[in-house]
Image (tube, rainbow, N blue to C red):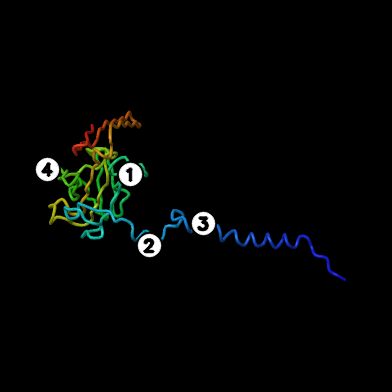
Amino acid sequence: MKKKKNPFHKIFILTAVFLFLTPLSSQAQSDSEPSSLPLTKETILFQEIPSVYGASKYEQKMTEAPSSVSIVTAAEIKKYGYRTLADILRSIRGFFVTYDRNYSYVGVRGFNRPGDYNSRVLLLIDGHRLNDNIYDSSYVGTEFILDVDLIDRVEIIRGPSSSIYGANAFFSVINVITKRGRNLKGAEVAGEAGTFETYKGRLSYGNKFRNGFEMLVSG
């Protein structure tokens, strides 16, 4: 007796073949798109290495600097909501900040002598010394002269650099690099309000003109 064929037999075979080939086609499509590739060790290894100025008083790669260097960029300042330079330094390995309701004091690797107004830390703005000439103190809290929104990056160079900068560069050198006119490209207004009737405002203008002249004014 001739055996009758099952009508669903061919449908089952076609469905199985379709399900087997679908992952292969989707995998081939994903391999052709470089944007969907995961971040590997190779991409991290060959990405651009940031440059630092404060370590040797000239631009060089962090891997070539003769110090342990940390860099905090403007994107990180915006991402984590840092409002003062002291907030930025709190996020750095080996640094801590204390506050006595008047000034902020920077400690490095557990050293923070009471009454020492940050005289063992050298503070620079674009490579220019900011420590005062009386107590050699550096101001990093709300008394800091620059708004954090005008900071392009902060270079923290650990270790003594007295041979380059003098006695203040005993624990570390903090070099604040400011933004340029090309970063603003116009006017910018900012304001803050806090408890205890605390208010703060800022008006800035920056631009780079066709003749090459570049300026940034803020108050």
In the picture of the structure, the residue carrying the numbered disc 4 is: 133
In the picture of the structure, the residue carrying the numbered disc 3 is: 29
Question: How far apart are the alpha carbons under marks 3 and 2?
Answer: 22 Å
Mark closer to the chain start, 2 or 4: 2
- Residue 94 versus residue 103: which sits nearer the camera? 94
Q: Residue at x 44, y 56 (%)?
A: 34
Q: Residue at x 32, y 28 (%)?
A: 197
Q: Amino acid at mark 2?
A: Glu
In the picture of the structure, the residue carrying the numbered disc 2 is: 42
Q: Check whether the beta carbons of the residues at disc 3 and disc 4 lie within 8 A of each other.
A: no
Q: Residue at x 34, y 61 (%)?
A: 45
User: Closer to the observer: label 2 or label 1?
Assistant: 2
Q: Amino acid at mark 3?
A: Gln
- Under tag 2, what secondary structure? helix
Q: Check whether the beta carbons of the residues at disc 2 and disc 4 lie within 8 A of each other.
A: no
Q: Amino acid at mark 1?
A: Ile
Q: Amino acid at mark 4?
A: Asn
Say few, some or many: other residues with alpha carbon within 10 Å of mark 2 (under 14 / 14 to 19 / 20 or more). Answer: few
- State the quadrant of the C terminus: top left
Q: Is residue 21 left or right of residue 214?
A: right
In the picture of the structure, the residue carrying the numbered disc 1 is: 77
Mark closer to the chain start, 1 or 3: 3
Question: How far apart are the alpha carbons under marks 1 and 3?
Answer: 38 Å
User: Closer to the observer: label 2 or label 4?
Assistant: 2
Question: How far apart are the alpha carbons under marks 1 and 4?
Answer: 30 Å
User: Closer to the observer: label 3 or label 2?
Assistant: 3
Q: Residue furthest bottom?
A: 1
Mark closer to the chain start, 3 or 4: 3
User: Closer to the observer: label 3 or label 4?
Assistant: 3
- Under tag 1, what secondary structure? helix
